[in-house]
Every structure is written in C-alpha cells, then in structure tokens.
Image: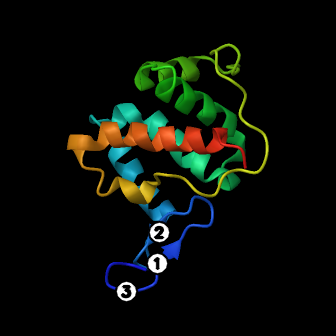
Amino acid sequence: MSPGGAPLDGCPQCGAQYANAGDSCASRFAQLLALDHSRQAPWGPLHGLAFSAYVLQHSAEHTASLERCWLMAYRVTVAGDDPSRLANALRRTRDATLESFDAPPLPHGTPPTRFALTIADLGDFAAADYAMRCRMWARSAINAWRTPR
C-alpha cells in the first residue's frame, strides 16, 4: 500500500513498487536515459553502470546483453573499476569475456525477482547523490544475482 492507502503496482521482474498506475520501470528508465544521453556528469559517465543495473533487474527483456552487464556491474561495484574507463574498454573489445576482465561467471538459474534497491528507489535522479545511488543500485543487482534462489 502507498502512504495514502492506495494499492501499489509492482514490477514482476524486479519487484519495484509504484503508487501511480502509469509509472513503471521502463518509463523511469526512459527518463534516466534522457539524462544519461546528455553526457553531463553525473549521469553520462555512469550510463554503462545504470544500463547494467537495469538489465540485471529486467533480464527477460535483455538476454543478449546480460553477460556484458554482469561484467560491468561486477567490475565497478566489486572490483572498484572506473565505470567510464571500463565502458570505453568494453566498446573497444568486441570479444570481451568475463575471464579476460577477471570477472566470475554470471550465476546460473532463474533470474532474481526481488532486489534491495530498484530504479524506483532512485527518486528523481538528483545530481547531488546520483553517483552513490547508481552504484548502490548496481550493487543490489549483483548481490541478488549472487544470492542462491
């Protein structure tokens, strides 16, 4: 239930909750992409990480990108790589493998459907704390995939 008592609509892929029927992860992601494509900090330099977090939480729509997104999110949130540098390296390397970037394999099994932090939790993507929240979002995605289901 929302604070006003209205039922919340939930995303079947990530579990995000929305009080407004017209809101969705896809619409929120479209808003974020508009900021990302401005190429302005903090959004532009984190585009690869934001895209990866979204794909890991909505994998049914993006199966072809899943392994590369795992690599990006893992290397940034666990290994501490710079997201812009890693994105540039991945763009230059079409044959990138998890092993070549020292990342563990994407966990097998059914994708998670509940995450500690979703795109709904990022609020209005305010510049002041976006970088921190984006990293937390990606970490949430990695942690959920690493948790046995």
**Mark 2 / mark 3, whichever is N-terminal:** 3
Quadrant where the N terminus sits is bottom left
Asked if marks 2 and 1 touch (Cβ < 8 Å), the reply is: yes
Compute the Cα span from label 2 to label 3: 13 Å
Which of the 4 quarters of the picture holds residue 19? bottom left
Q: Amino acid at mark 3?
A: Gly
Circle 2: element type? strand
Which x, y percent locates residue 102? Answer: 64, 15
Tell which of 59 and 8 is nearer to you: 8
Q: Which residue is mark 3?
A: 5
Q: Residue at x 32, y 36 (%)?
A: 39
Nearer to us: label 2 or label 3:
3
Within 10 Å of disc 1 (Cα), the crowding (few <14, some 14-19, many 20+) is: some
Q: Which residue is mark 1?
A: 8
**Mark 2 / mark 1, whichever is N-terminal:** 1
Which x, y percent locates residue 77? Answer: 48, 29
Could you say which disc has been placed on residue 17 in the image?
2
Q: Amino acid at mark 1?
A: Leu
Say if 93 sits above or below 119 in the image: above
Q: Residue at x 57, y 40 (%)?
A: 143
Res 37 visible = no
Say if 23 sits above or below 117 in the image: below
Which x, y percent locates residue 49? Answer: 47, 35
Circle 3: element type? loop
Within 10 Å of disc 2 (Cα), the crowding (few <14, some 14-19, many 20+) is: many
Nearer to us: label 3 or label 1:
3
Which of the 4 quarters of the picture holds residue 45? top left
Res 72 visible = yes
Q: Amino acid at mark 2?
A: Gln
